[in-house]
Amino acid sequence: MLLQLIKAIRPINLLVITLTFYVLHTLGINSLELIPGSYQISLKFLTISTLLIAAAGYLINDYYDKEIDFINKGNKQNPLSKQALLTGYIILNITALILSFTFAFSNYIFWIFPSSIFLLWLYSYRLKGLPFIGNLIVALLSAAVPFIYLSIQEISRGSLTNTHTYSVDLIIIFSFLAFFSTLARELVKDIEDIEGDKAQGLKTIPILWGIKTAKFWTIFFLLCTLFILGLLIAGIDYFAFNLLSLVIAAIFGVLPLLLSAAKSYQAAEKKHYKQTGNLIKISMFGFLLFIYIYAITL
């Protein structure tokens, strides 16, 4: 049962969140000369709270998608019962709230966590089945992770206005990269899950307007991501990127995005959409690796 639970909480996705906080933390230390010791302790526990809430979000999504996953995945779906999924969801969220209440050093920081819990539940219960709304919520939550870090960082230093540097610009740009790449990936998942979603009466973009339209918007959002990444690389003089970080950006950022756009255009089977989604995930790791290499060489 433990192995099934670990699989249900999407460890790869949780790893991306963990790496995001670690990379941004490294960037903050190296470029802004932070950080109070109490802040570092708080950040560790607030990161754990974020991971617990994200894991709970995956469990409640599986809870509501039990019938859909049976159609889309058959015997490959997670065998955990709905009761087990709900119990895990409650335990993880309660633990996250206790940690965030204990270690959040401002009311603003604390309320981020219950708000995220509510949005993830609302997404799974209702918004997922609405055209574009569900995709937008997931993309916004993904983009919010860097902003959560930035807010914690700024509040810990007692200022929200006096620390605007190139590192802050980089964090904001990273949020936009996460937003558009997640939008593209969510649309790919909608196409991949179209049979089960249709059987359960969901109103996703590929169901309402067809797979061709969904593929068009997927490619559009991938091109938006590429455009932003291109602008970032073009800012070499402002950010003073080193050669290694630029090579990383090209190989693990630009190339997977180009391949995922081409794969999405040509896709005709479910396995092709799975491959497209994996390429987008690789690009997300590429963004993080790019920023990390840049941060440690400042």
Image: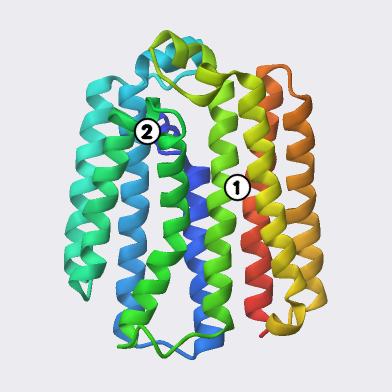
Q: How is the image coloured?
A: rainbow
Q: Name the residue nearer the viewer: 92 or 1.
A: 92
Tell which circle, 2 or 1, labels the residue nearer the N-terminal end: 2
As drawn, 189 above or below 281: above
Closer mark to the observer between disc 2 and disc 1: 1
Task: Tell me the residue at 45%/88% (across/down).
Answer: 163
Residue 284 lies, in percent from the top left, at 62, 52
- Residue 254 visible? The answer is yes
Residue 181, disc: 1
Task: Tell me the residue at 60%/31% (across/down).
Answer: 188
Rounded to the nearest angstrom, the CA distance separating label 2 from label 1 is 27 Å
Q: Amino acid at mark 2?
A: Leu
Query: Would you name the residue on which mark 2 appears?
Result: 5
Left or right: residue 130 compared with residue 275: left
**Quadrant of the image for the N terminus?**
top left
Task: Tell me the residue at 45%/16% (across/down).
Answer: 197
Left or right: residue 42 compared with residue 76: left
Left or right: residue 213 compared with residue 154: right
**Quadrant of the image for the C terminus?**
bottom right
Q: What SS does tag 2 mark?
A: helix
Q: What SS does tag 1 mark?
A: helix
- Residue 27 visible? The answer is no
Q: Amino acid at mark 1?
A: Ser
Residue 118 lies, in percent from the top left, at 24, 44
Residue 21 lies, in percent from the top left, at 47, 65
Residue 241, disc: none
Number of dots carrying numbers:
2
User: Which quadrant of the view contains residue 9?
Assistant: top left
Q: Residues within 10 Å of mark 1 (few under 14, many from 20)?
A: many
Residue 22 lies, in percent from the top left, at 50, 67
